[in-house]
Amino acid sequence: MPIDELDGRLIELFTAEPRVGVLEASRRLGVARGTVQARLDRLSRDGVIAGYGPEIDPAALGYGVTAFVTLQLRQAGGHDPVAKRLAQVPEVIEAHTITGPGDMLCRVVARSNTDLQRVIDVLVDVAGVERASSVISLATQVAYRTLPLVRASARRTGGAERRWPGEDGADGAKPGERPPG
């Protein structure tokens, strides 16, 4: 779904400050409250905004080890039964069907390396899983992000190649705000 610059600024504002209200957002963006509400409703209905929940840091919950586990599956039975079982393992925070040498890629968290071994053992015991290989993440270099995509999409739709207020922080504006002056 194409978005315009106002949609992008609205998404950026709510990403930076999820608790900002519709009235405050309308004030900061310089548009009517009804416009903000209608845009949020449309963006949610169209699936651009997938949710409004808090971001949880697994490390803050004691799960300081992150690993990526590639699973090779038996060719009979398909991915769905395995995916349903993986969804029951709390430490599996993402699972994707992939191309390449494996069949599924899981992002998992654990309390320690010893706990990671336990999690991998649980995954290998899932019916349909033939084999697992894992790599431990030492550091996150680029965290999950979507704002660059939002900005690029809004630029493409609007046809203008310009930087947004607050994009690089050099203009003194908060995300979603117009620069001072």
Image (tube, grey):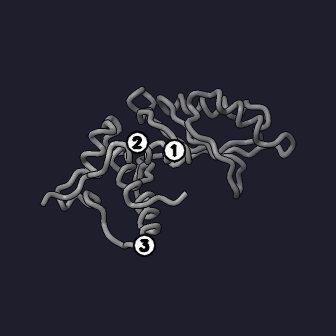
**Earlier along the polypeptide chain: callout 3 or callout 1?**
1
- In the picture, measured across the screen, residue 122 lies left or right of residue 161, that is right
Q: Report which quarter residue 120 is drawn in.
A: top right
Q: Nearer the viewer, mark 1 or mark 2?
A: 2
Q: Which residue is mark 3?
A: 159
Of residue 79 and residue 115, the one placed in the foreground of this image is 79
Find the distance from the CA under tag 2 to the CA under tag 3.
Answer: 25 Å
Amino acid type of the residue tagged 2 in the rendering: Gln
Amino acid type of the residue tagged 3 in the rendering: Gly
Cβ atoms under marks 3 and 1 closer than 8 Å = no
The spot of residue 78 in percent (x, y) is: 81, 42
Cβ atoms under marks 2 and 3 closer than 8 Å = no
The spot of residue 91 in percent (x, y) is: 56, 31
Where disc 2 sits, the SS reads helix
The numbered mark at residue 23 is: none
Find the distance from the CA under tag 3 to the CA under tag 1.
Answer: 42 Å
Q: Report which quarter residue 20 is drawn in.
A: top left
Where disc 1 sits, the SS reads strand
The spot of residue 175 in percent (x, y) is: 28, 51
Q: Residue at x 42, y 36 (%)?
A: 55
How many labels sit on residues? 3
Q: Which residue is mark 1?
A: 136
Outermost residue on the right side: it is 76
Q: Nearer the viewer, mark 2 or mark 3?
A: 2
Q: Is residue 142 above or below residue 15?
A: below
Q: Is the C terminus in the top left, top right, bottom left or bottom right quadrant?
A: bottom left
Q: Which residue is mark 2?
A: 37
Binning the other alpha carbons within 10 Å of mark 3 as few (below 14), some (14 to 19) or many (20 upward) gives few
